[in-house]
Image: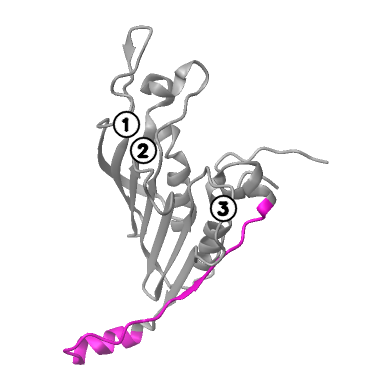
Amino acid sequence: DTMFWVGVEYRYIPSVDRLISEVHRGSIGSVKMLSIREHRFPFLRKVGNWNRFKENTGDTLVEKCCHFFDLMLHIVASKPIRVFGSGGQDVNHLDESYDGKKSNILDNAFVIVDFEGGQRACLDICMFAEASKNQEEICVVGDAGKVEACAPAHGAKAIDVDIPNFVIGRVDPSTRRRRAESDDQPPAPVVPEASHIEIDERLMEVGAHCGATYY
């Protein structure tokens, strides 16, 4: 057997993989907006507490969020031209000290990325939001629809298959234009298709990242 290591594995979470496929096949038209939210538990302890200091990791937006910036680039398929954001260390590790040095890593942030093709993306990261239904939630909006995917907390060992983790809704852009010219009342709601993209139970049992790391 051949063994290999997957680095930026979030794109291989089954529900996220389906989202990417739908976007790239044009199911929601031309991509305009992308949002990625990770609301999760604080950083776990690592060897030598290296992940408590930004001089070791490049800070949370590098060490943790490289996965999400990879997703942005992969989904949007355009070059970033502008990045701005705001973040801080407001809750986690404030009373931790190692060899006389206090922890100094971000535990929450918003980041917005503008792309060469006119698309924009937003990252919402919070490391003290473990009281959340999902750990990751991704939403892509195009001119012809919207697609969403989510993943449970990475400590989960099982998933309720009756709860959708993938949603897609489609619209006709020409209909939108006609409504804008003539309608003075809200349109009937578009009913999206919701489904559950299964994850192999064996993969859920052995590790995190919802099976994305294993092949």
From which residue to which does the magenta span run?
174-201
Identify the mark at residue 106; answer none if there is no mark: 1
Tag 3: residue type?
Answer: Ile
Residue at 52 percent of width and 65 percent of height: 24
> Where 121 falls versus 169 (above or below)?
above
Residue at 42 percent of width and 75 percent of height: 169
> Where 2 falls versus 91 (above or below)?
below
Answer left or right for 79 relative to 88: right
Residues marked 1 and 2 touching at CB (< 8 Å): yes
Name, please, the residue furthest toward the top. Answer: 99
Tag 2: residue type?
Answer: Met
Instruction: Identify residue for label 2.
Output: 127
Instruction: Identify residue for label 3.
Output: 13
Residue 107 screen position, x and y as percent: 32, 34
Disc number lying in front (2 or 3)? 2
Tell me if mark 1 has few (under 14), some (14-19) or many (20+) residues whose alpha carbon lies within 10 angstroms of its own.
Answer: many
Residue 127 screen position, x and y as percent: 36, 38
First in residue order: circle 1 vs circle 2 = 1
